[in-house]
């Protein structure tokens, strides 16, 4: 039986169907999860996709972090469940305190949409274990609040603990230390601003590097008892 990966939909989510398609192409079964329900339906992993949950009111991801599904995700993540936050999902993870730091308005104060070259800084996570250290991957990015910010102590801890997962080869938004994605201390929760679910089919003219996220988590799940 194929592993089941939940995809959460909040009001304002845009990329849930793209995430579900990426999961199917990667060989797993997508399961739709609704923001107002705390039932994770027995999934093996969870993806928080991109979009503009609750219109990005207050702060991007702030209201979504208070939803019933996130209470369940926090509990499951604490027990080791793999969780991936993409763009707005990354913002939700930071607002939920599952990941350190926060995402602020882009340094240029403009929405940026481009394919970004990312450097894989850590393969010690459940979502990157199938990549190679320092591998360069091509992943689309589209965001207005992608500027990763953390205080000096938090940044030092991220660097010391190998929790920076991805860096931009060319920083598009002003993120501290060129950070494009980070992980928690145990490596089961990862967030990044670029969209791997948009890099899964060569037919669209882009890379298929995004499939590495699915193959990584499937590799991790395959060795779990």
Image: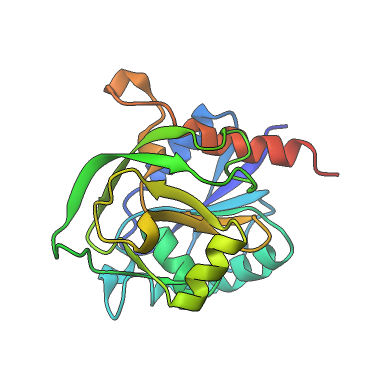
Residue under the image location 34 percent in, 64 percent down? 11
Check the image and report above or below for 127 versus 108: above
Q: Quadrant of residue 123?
A: top right
- Would residue 68 be seen by someone viewing this image from the given angle? yes
Residue under the image location 37 percent in, 32 percent down? 199
Q: In which quarter of the image is residue 108?
A: bottom left
Q: Residue furthest bottom?
A: 58
Q: In this view, does 208 lie to the left or right of 146?
A: right
Q: Nearer the viewer, residue 211 or 42?
A: 211
Task: Look at the image and tell me in which quarter the C terminus lies.
Answer: top right
Q: Quadrant of residue 38?
A: bottom right
- Residue 20 horizontal/vertical position (percent): 47, 40
Q: Which of 141 and 92 is in front in this view?
A: 141
Check the image and report above or below for 104 versus 17: below
- Residue 14 horizontal/vertical position (percent): 31, 52
Q: Total number of numbered labels? A: 0
Q: Is residue 43 left or right of residue 120?
A: right
Q: Which of 196 and 57 is in front in this view?
A: 196
- Residue 130 horizontal/vertical position (percent): 61, 33
- Would residue 100 be seen by someone viewing this image from the given angle? no
Scheme of colours in the image: rainbow
Residue under the image location 36 percent in, 55 percent down? 178
- Residue 72 horizontal/vertical position (percent): 62, 69
Q: Nearer the viewer, residue 74 or 134?
A: 134
Task: Look at the image and tell me in which quarter the N terminus lies.
Answer: top right
Q: Which residue lies furthest to the top in this view?
A: 203
Residue under the image location 20 percent in, 65 percent down? 107
């Amino acid at each position: 039986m194929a592993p089941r990966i939940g995809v959460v939909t909040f009001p304002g989510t845009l990329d849930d169907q793209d995430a579900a398609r990426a999961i199917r192409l990667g060989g797993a079964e997508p399961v739709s999860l609704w923001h107002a329900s705390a039932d994770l339906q027995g999934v093996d992993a969870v993806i928080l996709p991109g979009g503009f949950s609750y219109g990005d009111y207050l702060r991007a991801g702030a209201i979504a972090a208070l939803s019933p599904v996130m209470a369940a995700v926090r509990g499951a993540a604490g027990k080791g469940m793999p969780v991936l936050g993409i763009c707005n999902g990354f913002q939700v993870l930071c607002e939920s305190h599952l990941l350190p730091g926060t995402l602020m308005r882009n340094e240029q104060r403009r929405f940026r949409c481009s394919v970004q070259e990312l450097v894989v800084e850590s393969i010690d996570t459940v979502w990157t274990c199938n990549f190679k250290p320092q591998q360069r991957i091509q992943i689309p990015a589209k965001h207005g609040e992608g500027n990763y910010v953390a205080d000096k102590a938090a940044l030092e801890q991220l660097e010391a603990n190998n929790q920076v997962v991805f860096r931009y080869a060319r920083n598009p938004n002003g993120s501290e230390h060129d950070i494009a994605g980070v992980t928690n201390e145990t490596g089961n929760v990862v967030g990044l601003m670029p969209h791997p679910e948009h890099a899964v089919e060569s037919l669209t003219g882009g890379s298929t590097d995004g499939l590495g996220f699915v193959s990584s988590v499937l590799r991790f799940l395959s060795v779990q008892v």
